[in-house]
């Protein structure tokens, strides 16, 4: 019975991917992509990756979908000219042959994977008690491979700086996104007043419970960023100008705290980002608390895009 | 066929479909969309490999899964940067073509939209 | 007692699945957007509600059950506001969609 479910899911996902590629209008393709992301969440559940399922639902389906659909609506007028530039039949045949070759090569690799599968799970289990967290993925993210998480936070900041650098001259250092008018009788106003308290509790809960159960700061920060974006989209709050000092301090606080903990580890425990025995949980909590506002702001601001309005309100 | 093998093959097909869309679609936003399909196919392939590493009481190897979470977040930031570049190109030149023989909008971008 | 709970789960989940099926058929077959919205909100409210009611005997703790009911209420909220919003936009744009 489970095999039927898996086959059905795989067929649906392939169908939706094909729809995303061949759909005529860009908004329709993006909606197909959002549904594809949500179905991929179910696939992750079947593959026993619950933390990855949470991340895929939140960021892969949710945030990427919002980003792409707002871009698709803004670029609506360019679709007809782009369609006139369709590639020739020979290019399409070559592309199809190349895609088929890549798929075939990968399928052969999947079928030829070594048996028994190499795995690091026993080593994680053997060493997880020292990190004082119960969720093995949190232990990997913040203790065994903390360097990856630090570099990821810095990469996110670089991407945000890249997005900000695309502001036109008149809007340099200004507010991102268009000004939204609050409509007190509108549905968006109602949702933006009712949902954020629930969303904030849910986001903090998912962040806090990530220590011992599936969850974590990325998923929690995504929910908090989504609530912030909802409030801004309803016109109840305006996007902050990106030249504000408090904004920039909050953005760098996360990676700075992370690096500070790393240097502290280098001094007291012998290597960068190693934790002294008995203090692992405390230091992990410090890193997570410092990274939460950073991640929330980064995810929200990256979605808003480059500043379009000058600083004067 | 185990779930891991099935979804590994599905991921290979997704990468192929996305690659076709990336090459063939002329509109850059559709190319970004196809690139995201390729990315999610790669993540799914990695996840199938993680599932095969189930041992020691866990449903899947936690190290690849942690790397996947990092990968999904970084892929979103790459998409955000690409979309910002595309919107800036649209603001400056009025069209999103990547070919070089379309004249740019006369005047600077101070009066864009 | 256990058999009764299992039977309740099966019956309620199948009933919920029927409402989802009916909602999908309505989405595909109804003539215009307002009637399709009507069909979809049936799937949201009744379908998901029956599935949640059917799953309640299977949870391990009261807090897990409350979480499932909370999820249903959140889906109700978002589905209702989305349907209202779409309907309002459709009415404002005139009877041409």
Image (cartoon, coloured by chain):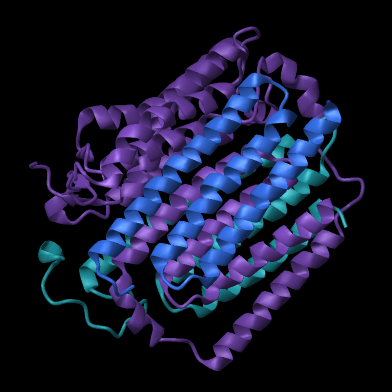
Which quadrant of the figure has residue C13? top right
Q: Residue furthest right?
A: A115
Q: Quadrant of the C terminus of chain C?
A: bottom left
Which quadrant of the figure has residue A236? top left
Which residue lies at the image location 42% right of the left edge and 74% below the top edge? Answer: A25
Where residue C86 appears, as percent x and y from the top left, is 35, 57
Compared across the picture, whether B27 is left or right of A205 comes to: left
Asked whether the viewer can see residue A5, the reply is yes
Where residue A241 appears, as percent x and y from the top left, is 19, 39
Q: Residue furthest left?
A: A312
Q: Nearer the viewer, residue C24 or A163?
A: C24
Q: Quadrant of the N terminus of chain C?
A: top right
Compared across the picture, whether C31 is left or right of A281 comes to: left
Q: Nearer the viewer, residue A1 or A149?
A: A1
Which residue lies at the image location 29% right of the left edge and 39% below the top edge? Answer: A190
With respect to residue A119, does A23 lie above or below?
below
With respect to residue A32, does C79 lie above or below?
above
Where residue A102 appears, as percent x and y from the top left, is 70, 71
Q: Nearer the viewer, residue B89 or A312?
A: A312
Tag count: 0
| Chain C, colour shown | blue
With respect to residue A312, does B2 lie above or below?
below
Compared across the picture, whether B7 is left or right of C81 comes to: right
Asked whether the viewer can see residue A47, the reply is no
Q: Which chain is cyan?
A: B
Which residue lies at the image location 23% right of the left edge and 63% below the top edge? Answer: C92
Which residue lies at the image location 52% right of the left edge and 52% below the top edge? Answer: C42
Q: Nearer the viewer, residue A144 or C83?
A: C83
Q: Residue furthest top?
A: A278
Where residue B44 appears, as percent x and y from the top left, is 68, 53
| Chain A, colour shown | purple
């Amino acid at each position: 019975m489970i095999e039927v479910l898996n086959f059905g899911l795989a067929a649906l996902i392939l169908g939706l991917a094909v729809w995303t590629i061949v759909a005529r209008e860009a908004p329709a393709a993006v909606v197909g992509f959002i549904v594809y992301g949500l179905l991929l969440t179910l696939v992750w559940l079947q593959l026993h990756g619950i933390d990855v399922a949470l991340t895929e639902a939140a960021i892969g389906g949710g945030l990427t979908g919002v980003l792409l659909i707002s871009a698709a609506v803004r670029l609506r007028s360019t679709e007809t000219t782009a369609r006139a530039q369709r590639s020739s039949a020979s290019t399409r045949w070559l592309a199809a042959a190349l895609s088929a070759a890549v798929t075939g090569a990968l399928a052969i690799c999947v079928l030829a994977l070594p048996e028994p599968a190499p795995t690091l799970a026993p080593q994680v289990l053997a060493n997880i008690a020292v990190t004082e967290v119960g969720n093995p993925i949190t232990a990997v993210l913040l203790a065994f491979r903390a360097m990856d998480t630090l570099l990821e936070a810095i990469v996110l900041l670089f991407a945000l700086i890249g997005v900000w650098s695309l502001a036109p001259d008149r809007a340099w250092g200004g507010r991102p996104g268009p000004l939204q008018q609050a409509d007190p009788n509108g549905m968006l106003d109602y949702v933006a007043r009712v949902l954020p308290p629930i969303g904030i509790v849910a986001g903090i809960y998912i962040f806090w419970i990530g220590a011992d159960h599936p969850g974590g700061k990325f998923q929690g920060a995504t929910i908090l960023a989504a609530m912030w974006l909802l409030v801004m989209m309803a016109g109840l709050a305006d996007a902050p100008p990106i030249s504000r000092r408090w904004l920039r301090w909050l953005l760098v606080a996360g990676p700075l705290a992370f690096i500070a903990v790393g240097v502290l580890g280098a001094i007291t425990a012998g290597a960068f980002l190693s934790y002294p025995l008995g203090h692992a949980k405390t230091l992990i909590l410090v890193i997570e608390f410092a990274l939460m506002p950073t991640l929330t702001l980064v995810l929200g601001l990256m979605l808003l895009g480059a500043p379009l309005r000058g600083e004067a309100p | 066929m185990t779930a891991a093998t099935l979804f590994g093959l599905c991921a290979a097909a997704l990468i192929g479909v996305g690659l076709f869309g990336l090459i063939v679609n002329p509109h850059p936003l559709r190319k970004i969309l196809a690139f995201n399909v390729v990315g999610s196919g790669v993540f799914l392939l990695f996840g199938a490999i993680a599932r095969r590493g189930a041992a020691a009481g866990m449903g899947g190897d936690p190290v690849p899964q942690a790397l996947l979470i990092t990968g999904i977040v970084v892929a979103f930031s790459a998409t955000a940067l690409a979309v910002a570049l595309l919107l800036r190109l649209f603001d400056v030149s009025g069209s999103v073509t990547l070919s070089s023989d379309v004249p740019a909008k006369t005047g600077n971008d101070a009066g864009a939209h | 007692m256990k058999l009764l709970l299992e039977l309740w789960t099966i019956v309620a989940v199948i009933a919920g699945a029927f409402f989802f099926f009916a909602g999908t058929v309505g989405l595909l077959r109804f003539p215009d957007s307002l009637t399709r919205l009507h069909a979809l909100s049936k799937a949201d409210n009744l379908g998901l509600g029956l599935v949640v009611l059917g799953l309640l005997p299977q949870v391990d703790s009261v807090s897990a059950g409350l979480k499932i009911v909370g999820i249903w209420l959140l889906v109700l909220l978002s589905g209702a506001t989305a349907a209202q919003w779409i309907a309002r936009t459709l009415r404002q744009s005139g009877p041409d969609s």
